[in-house]
Image (cartoon, grey):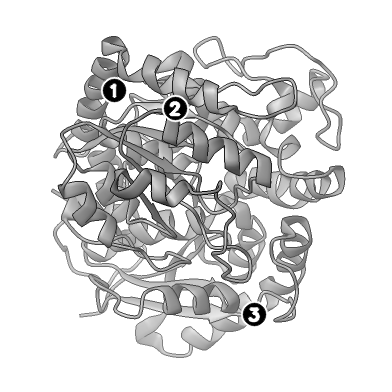
Amino acid sequence: MKYAHVLLIPYPAQGHVTSLMEAARCLTRNGLKVTFVNTEFTHKRVMSACLDIDGLSDMIRIVSIPDGMEPCDDRSDLGKMTKTVFQHMPTKFEELINDINKNNEEKITCIIADYGMGWVSRVAQKMGIRLAIFSPTSAAILALTMSIQKLIDNEVINCNGVPLKNEMIQLSSTMPFMDPTNFVWVRLGDATSNQIFFEYVYLGAKEAAEAADHIICNSTMNLEPGTFTLFPKILPIGPLLATNRSTKQLGHFWSEDSTCLRWLDQQPFRSVIYVAFGSFTLFDKSQFEELALGLESTKKPFLWVVRPGKNGNTDHEYPSGYMDRIGTRGKVVGWAPQQEVLNHSSVACFISHCGWNSTMEGVSNGVPFLCWPYFAEQYFNKTYICNIWKTGVGLDKDDAGIVTREEIKIKVEELLSNNMIKENALILQESVMNSLQAGNSSNKNLNNFIDWIKKGNHHVGDDETCD
């Protein structure tokens, strides 16, 4: 039997790779063949972090192409990396497709591209291949991107994406208010990096979304109803979770320390503060110390993910005598199996940077949030959590821009004593997970999307769809 063959390509960042990989696994479970395209640099990181790739179907092949940067180049300079990727990867991507298509049994049926790789739409159009766009962020952020021309016309931003108004706006009356000074492309770095992202990523994403046959996203209808009403082309298929199938998440850049799960087993029910800030957040010495002392001052057990530094350096400077004082009450790891952690009954709350994957994982497990956004769309995700869903509270910075130890202690106590927030989190969890059930919105959207892919390959049999 000849299978429909789908090519998937994420933007080369941790949260983008893992969420698109979950989408890939969903496709293979429904009889589609997947080639997953990473940059060479990302490919090496993913493979070295997960030597034993658990649960990877033989229907998935992971390949890599160059990103155009030298091995010694600093890929934490996101502006430089993004510009280089957009300039160099299209040619290599086209060469890869031509190479695959030499075998008539392997020809690409469809491309699914991360919206951060908008240049793919031009390659797909040139080669006559159907295109779908995947959004690893909230649907609202993609809606914002698709509304750029409207924002320019209404003089909310100028043609370079720079905010012109210091007042809250709504894309529609049923969507949350947005602060232009917190638009995703304004919160990515310095002015030069922001301009690169606006020009390449967000204008590119707008073009790709308009050209795509379908747009899918890791969200649910009930989380963002106003967005899906405004842009019905965006179809939620989430939550995309490995724990839905009792398998491990794939695509991590760092090795997971599963010893924390055994530590969680020893902690009381709903007692642990889980602390993790994703793959980009950086704290200076004073903020790191305040966080450490704040966790200590709560007198509660905590699991803290302290990510290795740029060169794999784990020599973080803790306050004097800190490790001795916290003893076994605190567990510090370099990287955690986060979905399994949040699914654990001993976790009480999640101190988070509010990246969209973390947001979806926390929501899907009914865990309340303490919100500490760092950059990009995380400020808007905090709005969802605190103001719309009411499943968390925000951590506020002092006049020096520091979240103090006192603030951490006070907000932890406030959150854990707020039964309404805890109840809201459990109600939201139930409705979000219900969307995956047979015949419900995310399940139906995914099945329809898979049917669309298969119809592009006339020799494919009728495989089973998701249950």
Q: Amino acid at mark 3?
A: Pro
Q: Is residue 219 left or right of residue 293?
A: left
Can you identify the residue that label 3 sits on? 66
- Residue 206 coordinates in the image, percent (x, y): 66, 43
Q: Secondary structure at mark 3?
A: loop
On residue 64, which mark appears? none
Mark 3 to mark 1 CA distance (whole Å)? 42 Å
Q: Secondary structure at mark 1?
A: helix
Q: Is residue 282 left or right of residue 457?
A: right
On residue 370, which mark appears? 2
- Residue 7 coordinates in the image, percent (x, y): 45, 69
Q: Amino acid at mark 2?
A: Leu
Circles 1, 2 touching at the beta carbon (< 8 Å): no
Q: Amino acid at mark 1?
A: Ala
Can you identify the residue that label 1 sits on? 425
Task: Using the rendered view, name the quadrant where residue 444 is placed.
Answer: top left
Please give the name of the residue rendered at 27% of the width and 72% of the height, measured from the top-left corner. 56
Mark 3 to mark 2 CA distance (whole Å)? 39 Å
